[in-house]
């Protein structure tokens, strides 16, 4: 007797789950139906800035697997079909096929919610003007590229200096724009502590990107034709021929909320370790619409990131298919690149540690990416937080050039293993002059942090 | 009442120990005397290939701290002074000042043995011919550069295809030489399994370096003037205007052996976790002259590597100065670069695992250094070994291009934390398209290894 799996959303989590479920159960055992509001499947939203910037030539390069490829694996994929309601009691979803605009109920035995996130779009005057763009979906990316193609002016304003904001700033620099980034915070990259964010600001300014901190956007000014002309802040107007919004995203849980499913403090779905929605044996959720456990602070977070979304999909598909897999949580690793600047973080910032009730020591060291005498040895700043008393590593932030970013993985693994900074001083990391000074910058930071833990007690 | 610390050897371990001891104890508490046979202190032997290759312009760039800088910190540094004997019972060393050629006994309260390693130099006919060079010391490097400067022919033969051999091959390519590397093993880089070594061979051949495996060198052929002319093997002669020996090194423990200090199966000094020579409260040893505990196999190894030598020095200096620090052991991480090829390893090879009595699964995956659609995404091969039953990570080997090598650090930390490959599949590693595919290559390998552990049981 065949069961039916319904999946809402056909991007990373949804299609990874569907594909993994299909690997584990053939079409006679499990029917798989996926509903997707948009027109694309399994694409890399993280790649959009590089497509806009021209580093990636074609949209289709961002699509890992097309709808037809999924269908060839016996997945009944319905694009342009929106789920309007989840009826948990009756195990069914109400869907609208956006083509014929026809509604119907579709029953499920198992349900996967992979509705992703929606961009924050502040209710500002002019926010819907022509020339104001989000960059959340491939459609968004295409619309922005179309605008860039027809726009004659070369002044761009990016609102928000988080990952997407700085990546879009680089993309627009690549396209020859004069770029201003407006951000609420005093320093860009609020995922870093302000002292590390200041390094990013300095470096970005060196790249010709103007960064305006503590900027509260009050309106988008338009011309008579309804096209964007400037971004208004309390301090003044910033002329703009194109505006990109990179203010962040929230879990897209409208359906889940209406269905009475459990949501957390960040608005994301709450799941158990196997990514089942809490209290619901037959409903799974993952990706940008769920909250995840931060293993360092013990608190929930909302971290929209493709790498988690893919892991969730894999785990959900395994569970749906009758197997066993869990997602233990995250340590909050993220890495980003603006031109040749690499920015990375994992674990807790100072304010996260304080909010978690942790007392900590904080050290910052300057080092280089290679042996000092080796060509192209580039400066690198590493900040490290460790808990007082225990010396447990709490977090690492790195700002540098080539070779800096992925070093954060050392700390990500150490956080997962709950290592102390004293233990980290003995780590046997790869050393050769083209790769590292004889003391890797992370080891230098660990030594200094360990000494500070001893000193502070 | 002042004590006297005597240090034998003024490179990484010796001078790190002396410097750290001085930080912890002032000149009134502790007199520090260092004897060094050669003429340099604290230099990066690992940097010699890059100096020879011209990437590092000057010898002095490789010297982290000069003799005078050490002396300015109240360290009595005596260059060109050889220690001839350690008298453990009387707590004294017999030294010869090579200048006036004068011998004397110098007493010690505490002794640090940092005698390093000596290169293997097979007793072949012609081995001492002009044009045959080792690259162990700065003096060796200078002698080689002098030879390269006066030699007209452009044919170089490197004997040995380990780290030093391949790095010297690159150096000689940079200097316009036609390079042949002769190695005993079937594949280069015997620190890797042969299947991974084969990838290195293919890549090096692509760089124009000729690699001859299974080559047993029988003699160095010379001309009438006593200059090298060719390297003879059982299979034939390889013409050579210059020969570089990179066959490996052995612990330099002649003094220690004569003094009756405990040596291990690899000929290195045996220490406790605080780097004290076993059974001797007042003698420490570290760096290339000691054996270290391999945390993965539980066996001793000899790993001559600057990064360990520096750690040892730091720990010894702390102990000498009355503090507490330990060196828990290594996991066997190493990384190397040949032109744009990056080669890395950590943990056990297949033969190490077998020798340790471990049964294992082995998987190899192909991935890329960046998202597939991102410019310059380069192929990367990751091999991973995990223990049967427990699934504990045993080792990782990586061969690839830019961005491949330092990924081995992920595995180095995971080995230290005794993680299973199943646990590794959930690691929260840095992801962004310029840095990694959405599944980092190490995660892809971990997933495959975990599946194989489950399958094999």
Image (spheres, coloured by chain):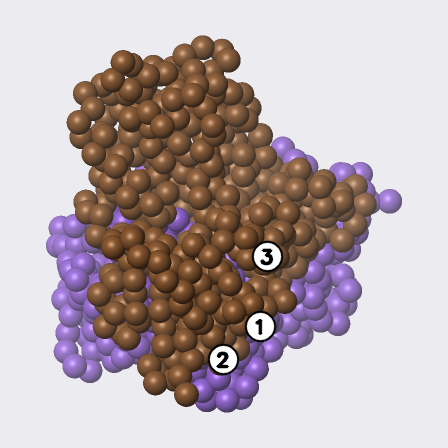
Chain colours: A purple, B brown
- Mark 1 secondary-structure assignment: loop
Q: Position of residue A217 (x, y in %)?
A: 25, 76
Q: To which chain does the residue with label 3 belong? A: B
Of A356 and B81, nearer the camera is B81
On the image, which quarter does residue B414 sit in? bottom right
- Do badges 3 and 2 share one subunit? yes
Closer mark to the observer between disc 1 and disc 3: 3
Closer mark to the observer between disc 3 and disc 2: 3
Which quadrant would the C terminus of chain B be assigned to in this image? top right
For the point 45% across and 78% down, the residue is B321
Whole-angstrom CA distance, mark 2 to mark 1, is 14 Å
Q: Which mark is residue B281?
A: 1
Q: Give the labeled residue for mark 3.
A: B260
Mark 2: give few (<14), some (14-19) or many (20+) Cα within 10 Å.
Answer: few
Of B78 and B188, nearer the camera is B78
On the image, which quarter does residue B27 sit in? bottom left
Q: To which chain does the residue with label 1 belong? A: B
């Amino acid at each position: 007797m065949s069961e039916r799996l319904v999946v809402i959303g056909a991007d990373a989590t949804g299609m990874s789950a569907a594909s993994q479920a299909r690997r584990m159960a053939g079409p006679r055992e499990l029917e798989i139906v996926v509903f997707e509001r948009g027109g694309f499947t399994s694409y890399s939203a993280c790649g959009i800035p590089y497509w806009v910037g021209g580093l990636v030539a074609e949209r289709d390069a961002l699509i890992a697997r097309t709808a037809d490829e999924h269908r060839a694996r016996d997945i009944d994929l319905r694009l342009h079909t929106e789920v309007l309601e989840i009826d948990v009691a009756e195990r069914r979803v109400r869907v609208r096929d956006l083509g014929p605009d026809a509604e119907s109920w579709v029953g499920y035995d198992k349900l996967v919610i992979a509705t992703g996130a929606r961009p924050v779009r502040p209710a500002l005057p002019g926010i819907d003007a022509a020339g104001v763009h989000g960059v959340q979906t491939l459609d968004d990316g295409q619309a922005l590229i179309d605008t860039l193609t027809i726009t004659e002016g070369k002044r761009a304003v990016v609102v928000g200096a988080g990952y997407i904001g700085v990546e879009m700033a680089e993309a627009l620099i690549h396209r020859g724009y004069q770029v201003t980034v407006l951000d609420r915070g005093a320093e860009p990259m609020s995922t870093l502590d302000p002292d590390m964010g200041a390094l990013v600001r300095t470096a970005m300014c060196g790249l010709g990107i103007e960064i305006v901190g503590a900027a509260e956007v009050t309106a988008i000014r338009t011309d008579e034709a309804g096209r964007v002309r400037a971004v208004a802040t309390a301090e003044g107007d910033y002329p703009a021929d194109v505006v990109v919004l990179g203010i962040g995203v929230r879990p897209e849980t409208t359906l889940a909320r209406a269905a009475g499913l459990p949501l957390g403090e960040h608005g994301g779905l709450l799941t158990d370790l196997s990514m089942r929605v809490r209290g619901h044996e037959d409903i799974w959720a993952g990706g940008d619409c769920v909250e995840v456990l931060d293993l360092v602070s013990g608190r929930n977070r909302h971290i929209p990131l493709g790498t988690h979304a893919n892991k969730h999909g894999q785990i959900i598909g395994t569970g749906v298919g009758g197997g066993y897999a869990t997602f233990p949580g995250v340590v909050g690793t993220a890495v980003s690149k603006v031109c040749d600047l690499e920015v990375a973080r994992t674990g807790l910032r100072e304010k996260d540690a304080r909010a978690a009730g942790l007392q900590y020591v904080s050290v910052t060291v300057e080092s280089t990416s290679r042996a000092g005498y080796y060509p192209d040895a580039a400066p690198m700043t590493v900040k490290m937080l460790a808990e007082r008393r225990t010396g447990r590593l709490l977090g690492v932030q790195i700002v540098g050039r080539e070779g800096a970013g992925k070093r954060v993985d050392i700390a990500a693994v150490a956080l997962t293993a709950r290592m102390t900074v004293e233990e980290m001083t003995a780590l046997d990391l790869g050393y050769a002059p083209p790769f590292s000074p004889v003391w890797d910058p992370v080891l230098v930071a660990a030594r200094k942090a360990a000494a500070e833990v001893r000193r502070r007690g």
